[in-house]
């Protein structure tokens, strides 16, 4: 048996060697497969990381592109608005130029009218009932003097003229009492009724008179008008309630 056991042992040993060799070869192949798989995994991870980076860069570029589009749209809207403003300003400039041309023509037409109105105002005061005469003449003279001043615009000059005429018109709707002097220097109380009647009474109440528009002189009235004029002065000063008072009214002159 010893003679047969040796070959069998050798066969077993040889078989074991072959198996070990096969296992070793298989292990090497397995190791290479694992290494390859690990390398592929690392490459895949690197590739995915690169993809993620590219995707992030792409998204950033998309965001920047959208921002540029939004800014472009905003600039377009702004430019359109500015163009509309410019167009409107150009229209206003053209309108102002037309108005200035018309204003220049208006000034040429208005200046002669203002001169005539200013000169006529003084003539009207001179021809009117002489109540507050110096005050009204000073106002008329001031209007005339204003026309020659270069520091006052034509519109302001025209306003002053209109205000002076309005002041004269206001006299026709009012009644007043004021102290003044007759041409001879005597201090009296004047009673103005509208712009048609002017009465006076001495400070002691003893003398009463009026401005006669027919003779254009101050004349004394009889004592019968002393009380009516005194009452009229009291009414004008709001000292008594308004009432009817008998005062002389000039009859129109026959031609």
Image (spheres, helix red, strand yellow):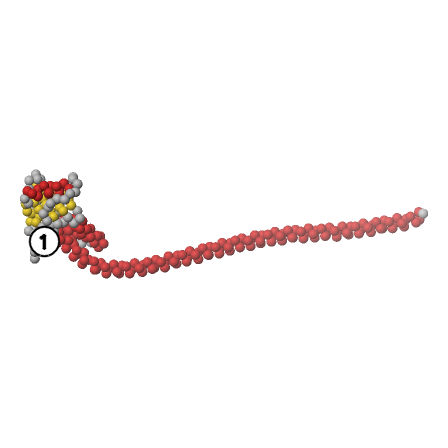
Query: 244 or 57, which lies in front?
Result: 244
Q: Residues within 10 Å of mark 1 (few under 14, many from 20)?
A: few
Residue at image position (18%, 54%) is 147
Task: Estimate the x, y position of residue 149 in percent, counting from the top left.
Answer: 18, 53
Q: Is residue 189 above or below residue 28?
A: above
Task: Estimate the x, y position of residue 156 in percent, counting from the top left.
Answer: 22, 52
Q: Which residue is mark 1?
A: 252
Residue at image position (7%, 57%) is 255
Query: 233 or 153, which lies in front?
Result: 233
- Please state if 215 lies on the left or on the right of 243 as rendered: left
Residue 253 visible somewhere in the drawing: yes
Q: Quadrant of residue 98?
A: bottom left
Task: Estimate the x, y position of residue 127 in percent, counting from the top left.
Answer: 11, 53
Query: Disc 1 on helix, strand or loop?
Result: loop
Residue at image position (37%, 57%) is 85
Residue 178 visible somewhere in the drawing: no
Task: Estimate the x, y position of residue 228 in percent, counting from the top left.
Answer: 10, 43
- Please state if 235 lies on the left or on the right of 26 as rendered: left
């Amino acid at each position: 048996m010893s003679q047969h056991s040796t070959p069998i042992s050798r066969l077993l040993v040889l078989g074991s060697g072959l198996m070990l060799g096969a296992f070793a070869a298989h292990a090497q192949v397995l190791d290479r497969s694992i290494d390859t798989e690990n390398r592929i995994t690392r490459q895949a991870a690197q590739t995915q990381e690169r993809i993620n980076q590219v995707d992030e860069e792409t998204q950033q570029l998309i965001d920047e592109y959208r921002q540029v589009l939004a800014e472009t749209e905003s600039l377009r809207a702004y430019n359109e608005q500015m163009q509309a403003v410019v167009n409107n300003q150009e229209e206003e400039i053209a309108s102002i130029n037309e108005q200035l041309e018309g204003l220049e023509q208006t000034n040429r037409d208005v200046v002669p009218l203002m001169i005539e109105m200013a000169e006529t105002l003084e003539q009207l005061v001179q021809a009117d009932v002489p109540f507050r005469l110096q005050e009204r003449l000073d106002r008329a003279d001031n209007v005339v003097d204003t026309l020659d001043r270069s520091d006052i615009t034509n519109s302001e000059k025209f306003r002053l003229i209109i205000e002076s005429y309005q002041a004269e018109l206001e006299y026709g709707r009012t009644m007043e009492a004021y102290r003044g002097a007759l041409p001879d220097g005597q201090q009296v109380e004047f009673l103005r009724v509208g712009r048609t009647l002017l009465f006076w009474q001495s400070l002691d109440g003893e003398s009463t008179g009026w401005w006669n528009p027919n003779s254009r002189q101050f004349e004394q009235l009889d004592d019968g008008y002393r009380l009516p004029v005194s009452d009229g002065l009291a009414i004008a000063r709001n000292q008594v309630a308004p009432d009817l008072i008998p005062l002389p009214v000039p009859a129109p002159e026959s031609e």
